[in-house]
Every structure is written in C-alpha cells, then in structure tokens.
Amino acid sequence: MADDEAAEKYGAEWVAANEELELLELTGADHDQETFLGATSTPVLFGAAVANLGVRQLLNILVELAPPATARPTVAGGEQPVDSGFSGFVFKIQANMNKAHRDQVAFMRICSGRFERGMVVTHAGTGRPFTTKYAQQVFGQGRDTIDEAFPGDVVGLVNATALGIGDTLYADKPVQYPPLPSFPPEHFAVCRADDTGAYKRFRRGIEQLDGEGVVQVLRSDLRGDGLPVLAAVGPMQFEVATFRLEAEFGVKVHLDRLPYEIAAVTDAEGKELLRGESQVEVMTRVRDGALLAVFAHRWRMRTVAGRHPGLKLDAPLDAGL
C-alpha cells in the first residue's frame, strides 16, 4: 500500500506511526547494514502481538537483511568454504513440539556442501557415524520431509537424541565449529516437585531442559539428586522451565531461590578449601561434571580468593553450552 493510500485509510493512526518512527531516527536508531553484517549492531523489529499478523512482512525483512551463507570459522583456526564437503552445526534442541509423538528435534544449520536425507555423516565430537534418515523442514506447526538442503538452510533431525547444542556433523573431510557464545548464570534456585509420585517424570523433564540449554542443572551435596539446582542467566528462564515441566511432563514444581549471584569453575582441592566458607557453595554441573563454586556476590568471591591464593576460580563462568 502506497503512503498516500495509507494516510487516507488510517488517518490519525498513520500520522502517529510516522511521528514515532521519526523519534527513532532522531535517536540514531536507524538500521545500519554494515554494522549489522559486522556483528556490532542488532536490528529490532516492531510488530503486533497478534497471532499470524505481520508474519509475512517479518519474513520479507529477514530475507532482505540477512546475509547469504559464507565461510565459517573452525576450531582449527581456518574457515570452511560453503562449496566444500557437507558440514552442519546443531544450534538448537527442542522436545515435545509435536504432543502426539513426544519427539525431539535437533535443528542443524547447513554450513557447507549439500545435505541429502539418509546420508551417513560423522559426529565431530565422538567420531561416531550418524544417520540422517528422519530429516524435516519445520515451519511453525508444519513439518515437511526434506530430501536435500544447502548452506544457510536449517534441517530438523527428528529423535536425534545423540546430538547436543554446539555439535558439528560432517562428511568426508573432518571439521569442527566453535560452540555457541553464552552468558554466565546469575540466578539459582532449588527445584522440587509438588507431587513426589511424579518423580520419574520430573527427572525426565529436568534432563530434557538441561539438554536443550533452557537452564543449567546443578547437583548439590547438601540437597541430593532429588532436589536439583537450576542456574539461569535471567529469571524468565525459570518461568519457561516451570511452565514446560507442567505443560509437557505434567509435573507442578516449586522453586526456592538461592542467595547466589555468580559462579566460577573450581576443582576438587578448591571444593575442600571452600567447605568452611560462608555465602559459598560448591555444586556439580550435571551436563559435564564440572565443579562450580557459587558466591553471594563478586565482593565475596574476591574476598575468598584473596584468603586462598592457590584457589582455582575461573570466572566469570561460561555457560558451557
């Protein structure tokens, strides 16, 4: 719709919208494609909070602004050209998208080469073969079997339970991509099921959320395996976790917030040194067995570190996803 047609149809609403856009321009909030491509700025899109309204416009903007697939840096220090052999990167895990099947989908971005459904590839982390028989293209609630894909495409691998976020798959020449950047947790809470009879579902749900990276799950010697500690970057992650545990696993839970704000990786010796310290606790990250020392605040961490010069404290903690 042309500007003059929109002005005639919407009148005062059209005028107000243009005035608000002018305010954004005056603040210097214009989109800059060069800084966007250089990963120094992030476009912010405004839309209506109504289902299916403006979806096509959003997709059109993404097509217009998003860069084409390019060579991707590797762990080895080089780059993987898009026209080299097949490789893909798993950036998201999502379970229970289809309630009728209770399946799990690993979303893989094709980084180079040509993907063909059913091809046997190699898991870079383990060196084991992986078959891509159940490959789909997922869009909203719709799913279609996909037979081939190319760099920039996203393929959903169904029930790929052997895959985790940050995994690389390749064919022919070995390659591995760096893990996704992440932020250290600053919020901690003990999670308990309201119904002890639902413990199996509770445990399965906690394991699933941990695998997806919704939260980090920690094990505390003070509380035991039945009371996992959830670690999150922001409080909203707790809301997502509790909602999904109830909606997808039928388990209502209660969260008891812990008075900690920062975590650092330590070792067995550090665990012993910290045993008698107040406002400090050492927990085990379930995903990889790392020992995490959690502190009430940074000042407390610095004080404890100054009292124990040989104490291992690698902080701020990378979320390790």
Image (cartoon, rainbow, N blue to C red):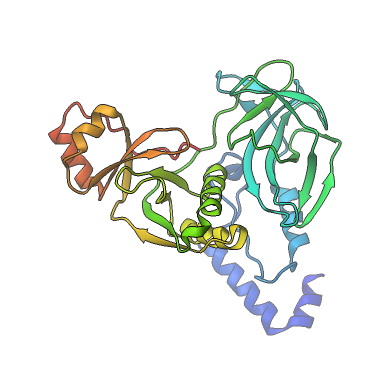
Residue 100 visible from this viewpoint: yes
Q: Position of residue 191 (x, y in %)?
A: 42, 56
Residue 28 visible from this viewpoint: no
Q: Position of residue 248 (x, y in %)?
A: 62, 58
Against 173, residue 49 (above or below) is: below
State how many labels appear. 0
- Give the residue at x 61% y 31%: 167
* Residue that sits furthest to the front in the current view: 197
Q: Is residue 203 left or right of residue 68?
A: left
Q: Is residue 126 left or right of residue 287?
A: right
The quarter of the image holding the N terminus is bottom right
* Depth check, front residue: 317 or 40: 317
Q: Is residue 277 left or right of residue 293?
A: left
- Give the residue at x 34% y 44%: 220
Q: Position of residue 199 (x, y in %)?
A: 50, 54
* Depth check, front residue: 227 or 176: 227
- Give the residue at x 71% y 69%: 51
* Residue that sits furthest to the bottom in the current view: 12
Residue 98, quarter of picture? bottom right
* Depth check, front residue: 321 or 46: 321
* Residue that sits furthest to the top in the current view: 173
* Residue that sits furthest to the left in the current view: 307
Against 13, residue 317 (above or below) is: above
Q: Is residue 269 left or right of residue 96?
A: left
Q: Position of residue 97 (x, y in %)?
A: 69, 54
Residue 303, quarter of picture? top left
- Give the residue at x 24% y 27%: 269
* Depth check, front residue: 48 or 110: 110
Residue 178, quarter of picture? top right
